[in-house]
Image (spheres, rainbow, N blue to C red):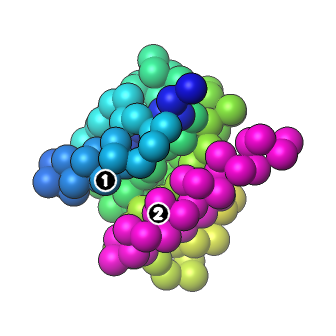
Amino acid sequence: MRRTVLIVDDSRPLRLALRCIINQQAGWYVCGEASNGVEGVAAAVKLRPGVVVLDFCMPVMNGVEAAAQIRKLVPEARLLMFTSFATSSVEEAARLAGIEVLVDKDDCAKLLQSLEHFEINKQVA
């Protein structure tokens, strides 16, 4: 069974890079992309991904606002924030919105570890 990921980030080059990295991982598949929070919420409702990777700073709706809506509309989705703005205030707001893990954009290895951690916890639960 392939586990699905939705990437929500306003940077098209970053979305493409993440798609390549994630799709190379055994069992993982990027099912969709969105360039802002509003598109991300709509895509999450339509695609029902296992994991949503959100940027914080995006036009129209930021990642924290999108996460709060996705948490309500697609409660089974795991939420991960992949951002360059990993401050304590952003982290606190992210956690309150339902984001489980905050990963700095300089650390792709931690992003992949977090995806694997989500899968391990799903199997145990």
- Furthest residue in direction bottom, as rendered: 88
Tell me if I can see residue 15 in this picture.
Answer: no
Residue 30 numbered mark, or none:
none
Mark 1 is surrounded, within 10 Å at the Cα level, by few (under 14), some (14 to 19) or many (20 or more) other residues, namely some
Q: Residue at x 19, y 47 (%)?
A: 16
Which quadrant of the figure contains the N terminus? top right
Name the residue beneath numbered marker 2: 111
Q: What element carries label 2?
A: helix
Give me the residue at 47% from left, 60% from top: 112
Check disc 1 and report the residue beneath it.
21
Q: Which of 99 and 21 is in front in this view?
A: 21
Identify which amino acid the numbered label 1 is placed on: Ile
Q: Which residues fall within the magenta stretch?
A: 98-125
Closer to the camera in the image, 14 or 96 = 14
Judged from this view, the residue extending furthest toward the front is 26
Q: In which image quadrant can residue 73 be found?
A: top right
The residue at 14%/54% (across/down) is: 13
